[in-house]
Each structure stands twice: as structure tokens, then as C-alpha cells.
Image (spheres, rainbow, N blue to C red):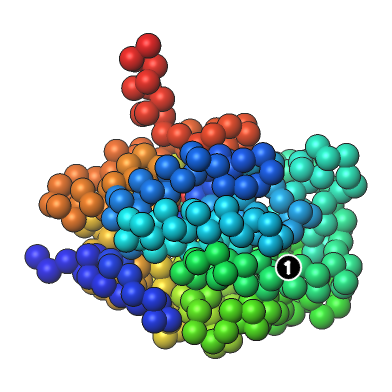
Amino acid sequence: MVSVLFSPISIKGLPLANRLMRSATFEQIAAKDGDVSPKELDLYRDLAAGGVGLIITGIINVCEQGRISPRQNSLSTDGHIPGMARLASEVHGQGGKVAVQLFHAGRESARMHAWRGGGPAAGPSALPGEAHFPYENRAMTQEEILQVVDDFGKAAGRAKEAGYDGVQVHGAHAYLLGQFLSPHTNHRQDEWGGSLSNRLRLHLEILAAIRAQVGPDYPVMFKLGVADGFEGGLPLEEGLKAAELLAQAGCDCLEISQGLRGDNYEQSEFHTKVDRPGGEAYFRSWAAKVKQRVDIPVAAVGGVRTPEIAEEILARGEADLVALSRPLISEPSLPARWQKGDTARTRCISCNKCFELVLQGRHISCIFDRQESANKV
Ligand SMILES: Cc1cc2nc3c(=O)[nH]c(=O)nc-3n(C[C@H](O)[C@H](O)[C@H](O)COP(=O)(O)O)c2cc1C
């Protein structure tokens, strides 16, 4: 069989050895001040040696107001450049490619604000807490929004200076850009709210600010949530239009995921019932719809677990790349294993115990590794 999965591709001139992308994964193992830790150097070296075509880092905060955890890396100041440069060179030393995921949590930084004794976190609109998110937040001022735009631009400039191969803006899930795009959390009446083009203004301004810092030839990607996980949130048709507008504005690659989360894992980006027939690659139809509307590379993420499904998505032209998160937590060398011909599905069972560790403020790990080390004791 001719493998599309292990054929090369390039994103804005950046050559990638294969079509497998490591979807951004927050490991909670940064040093306390947001600097790169020795554990991170080991983890990224293993990932790069495992053969994935492009690594997207975990969330990297662009400013302190948008931070979600004390154990999160940062590019909010020039002082973070040397540490982040070590991480990039660890990946390059293994022949890998790596892009930074630029992130602002918006209202989801509430726990950090509370922990630091600050006031409520800021999002697009002042909102009361909800059942699954019991923190009220305040609305950002116009000045704060413009500051965030500037912060993303400057952080991208630092990523380039630190030697990264590109940046990906986090525009998916529960965080600031997803909050601006969704009519559920964005009730603004000014030019940052209301119509789709207003709710997408933050994304487009950030893209322009990044481009001004990194120049025309540097890969600038977005992970985009094209629909919220519940009724009454961002509708798919608007998310697809947003993808089209981002591509027209000069975004170089789109990874297609979900927007805001509902009340359970099945209404989030972390589905659990991935082993059932039809459960694998649960957002592939969204990626396929985006692919029909844009002429930049599109990545499908969410529940890809077998090389057969990955090949099928690529061969049918539903996406140009497939992205994996939980399988690479469990098996960083999965791409190399598949490429060598051992095509058994990942050992990841999508139990989300890795994510639950992160929620508890602990280091990421796979439950199977924890069981193995417990058995050795
Ligand atoms: C522990 C954990 C941390 C994650 N951290 C991030 C992150 O930093 N940024 C992001 O965009 N998505 C993050 N995700 C979501 C994944 O990138 C991915 O979209 C989702 O897990 C579905 O893909 P999968 O089925 O291959 O795991 C995280 C997922 C997990 C399990």
C-alpha cells in the first residue's frame, strides 16, 4: 500500500517528513516561573525521536493575565527566550520540527486570578459562573483587547527568535478566542461582538499583529473550534465561515477542533467512546467541510487511533494532516512504530486520566505507565 501518512508535506515552505502532527498538549511540567524544565527537554526529545512530522507545544502564555497554571511555559517576556530556545533545539537535534501554541485563557484564568488574590478574570463579556465553571468574570476593556493583540504579536516574534519553525494560535476549546467567537460568551455591543465578522475580529487582528512581527514567510497557524459542544453555542456554519475568513486573511494551516465545552467529555474535545465503531476521528467531517472551502493545509484532530483511519482521512482528501494528542502521551514513538509496519492501534484508551491529572495540578502521564511503575514497587 502507498502510504499518504508517511509522505512529506510543507506548510508555508516548512518541509515536514510526514502528515502526523502532535496536537498541542499541556503537560504541566514547566518550572514554576514558566521557564523550560529538564523534564520538558526529555519529553520533547522523546516526541521528536518518535517520528511525528510536526510538534505543536502545549499552551504557551502570551501575558500573565492569560495564564491558566503556574506550571505553564511563557513567551510573555524576552527573558523566556533562552529557555524556549533550548526546547526548540532539543527537537531540532532529533531532526524534528516544532511550533509554539500561543495562548490566552480569557475567563478560564479565573483560578489563577483567585490564587494570586486578584480580581475576577476578564473575557469578552461580564458573565456569572455556570454549573461546570463556577467563576464570574468581567468584560475586557477596549484597551485590554488591544493589549492582548499586541501580546500575541510580540510572543510570536519571540517564538521566531527562539528558533521555532512556526506558531499556532489557540483559537479552540474554552479559551479567550473561543470565548470571543461564541455568541454564548460574547455579548458585546461594540465592534468586538454581534456579527460573525465582529466576533472574529480578535482572531484577525492577532493574525495581522503576528504577521507584522514574523514577516510574510513564517508559518502562522490556527487551531480553530468550528462549533461549540452544546445547543445554542457557535453553530457549525459560522465556524466554517470563520475558517474561510482566516485562510483568506493569510493563515497558513488550520487544525479543526471544537469550540466551547458542554457539561461532559462527549460535549468536549476529549471524547471517550473512541473505540466504538464510528467513534474514531470524531471531528473529521468538520475538517472535511473546511478543506472544501480553503486552499491551505487542514489538520484533522480528535480521536484518531489507527493508521487505517488516518490514511483514509488523507486519501479521501478530508484533511492534509492528522493530529494526535492522547496517543502520543501514551506512546511518543507511535509514528515510528506505525511507519515500521507495526500498525496495531495505539494503546491509548481515551480514558482521560491524563487530562484529569492536569486538572488536579499534577504532571501529565499515561495511566498505563503509572500502573507499570506501581507494579514494579
Ligand atoms: C492532557 C491534555 C492536554 C491538552 N492540552 C492542550 C493544549 O495545550 N492545547 C490545545 O489546543 N489542546 C490541548 N489538548 C487537546 C488535544 O490537543 C486534542 O485536541 C484532543 O485531546 C483530541 O485529540 P486526541 O483524541 O488525539 O487526544 C489537550 C489534551 C489533553 C488530553
Q: Residue at x 47, y 58 (%)?
A: 88
Q: Residue at x 64, y 56 (%)?
A: 80
- 340 with respect to 356 (left or right): left
Q: Is residue 205 above or below residue 162?
A: below
Q: Which residue is at the front of the view, 284 or 164?
A: 164
Residue 288 lies in quadrant: bottom left
The reply to whether residue 284 is in sight is: no
Q: Residue at x 61, y 37 (%)?
A: 359
Q: Residue at x 89, y 68 (%)?
A: 141
- 247 with respect to 346 (left or right): right
Residue 142 lies in quadrant: bottom right
Residue 119 position within the rendered picture, expressed as x and y whole percent measured from the top left: 90, 47
Residue 289 position within the rendered picture, expressed as x and y whole percent measured from the top left: 43, 75
Q: Is residue 153 above or below residue 363?
A: below
Indicate the quadrant containing the N terminus: top left, top right, bottom left or bottom right. Answer: bottom left
Q: Is residue 271 above or below residue 369?
A: below
Residue 72 position within the rendered picture, expressed as x and y whole percent measured from the top left: 63, 46
Tally of numbered tags: 1
Residue wearing tag 1: 151
Q: Amino acid at mark 1?
A: Asp
Give the residue at the far left of this rendering.
Answer: 1
Q: Which residue is at the front of the view, 108 or 55?
A: 55
Residue 265 position within the rendered picture, expressed as x and y whole percent measured from the top left: 53, 43
Indicate the quadrant containing the C terminus: top left, top right, bottom left or bottom right. Answer: top left
